[in-house]
């Protein structure tokens, strides 16, 4: 449950569909900026699917070689997702400049 800006207890209300769920059922609690949010298992899995779809879209327009160069650098430099997306955008800009 959310009280003020804190997550309290093991009973939660989904921030998307308003259903009740517990820690035992799964789902997730966290923060978007400073706003506390809780997602039930169904909404959480839906949100993860959406992110996956967006990530796939980011790669469109890049060749397998371009992707591999970015992925190898990502592993080598231990980049987080934000940096990887920035690198993909930079690569796309570079390609579209021609
Ligand atoms: Zn939900």
Image (cartoon, grey):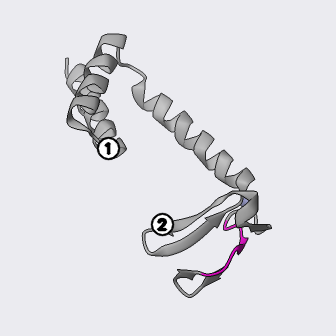
Question: Was residue 11 drawn as part of the magenta stretch in this picture?
Answer: yes
- Give 76 or 83, whichever is nearer the viewer: 76
The quarter holding residue 28 reads bottom right
Instruction: Using the image as rendered, state which of residue 4 and residue 92 is in the foreground.
Output: 4
Whichever of labels 2 and 1 marks the residue nearer the N terminus, that label is: 2
Please tell me in which quadrant of the rendered image residue 25 appears.
bottom right
Q: Residue at x 20, y 35 (%)?
A: 77
- Residue most toward the bottom? 4
> Foreground: 89 or 48?
48
Can you say whether 46 is above or below 15 in the image? above
Q: Residue furthest right?
A: 19
Residues marked 2 and 1 touching at CB (< 8 Å): no
Residue 22: % across, % down: 75, 68
Residue that appears at 53% across and 66% down? 30
Label 2 element class = strand
Q: Quadrant of ligand 1?
A: bottom right
* Some atom of ligand 1 lies within 8 Å of the CB belonging to the residue at label 2: no
Q: Is residue 28 magenta?
A: no
Query: Which structural element holds mark 1?
Result: loop
The residue range painted magenta reads 8-15
For residue 8, side relative to residue 87 (left or right): right
Taking 42 as reference, is 51 left or right? left
Q: Looking at the picture, how far across and down is residue 96, in whole percent?
A: 26, 22
Residue at image coords 42%, 69%: 33
């Amino acid at each position: 449950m959310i009280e003020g800006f804190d997550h309290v207890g093991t009973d939660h209300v989904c921030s998307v569909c308003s259903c009740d769920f517990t820690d035992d059922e799964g789902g997730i609690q966290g923060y978007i900026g400073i706003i506390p949010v809780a997602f039930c298992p169904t909404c959480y899995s839906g949100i993860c699917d959406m992110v996956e779809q967006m990530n796939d879209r980011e790669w469109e327009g890049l060749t397998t070689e371009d992707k591999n160069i970015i992925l190898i650098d990502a592993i080598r430099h231990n980049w987080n997702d934000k940096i990887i997306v920035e690198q993909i955008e930079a690569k796309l800009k570079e390609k579209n400049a021609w």
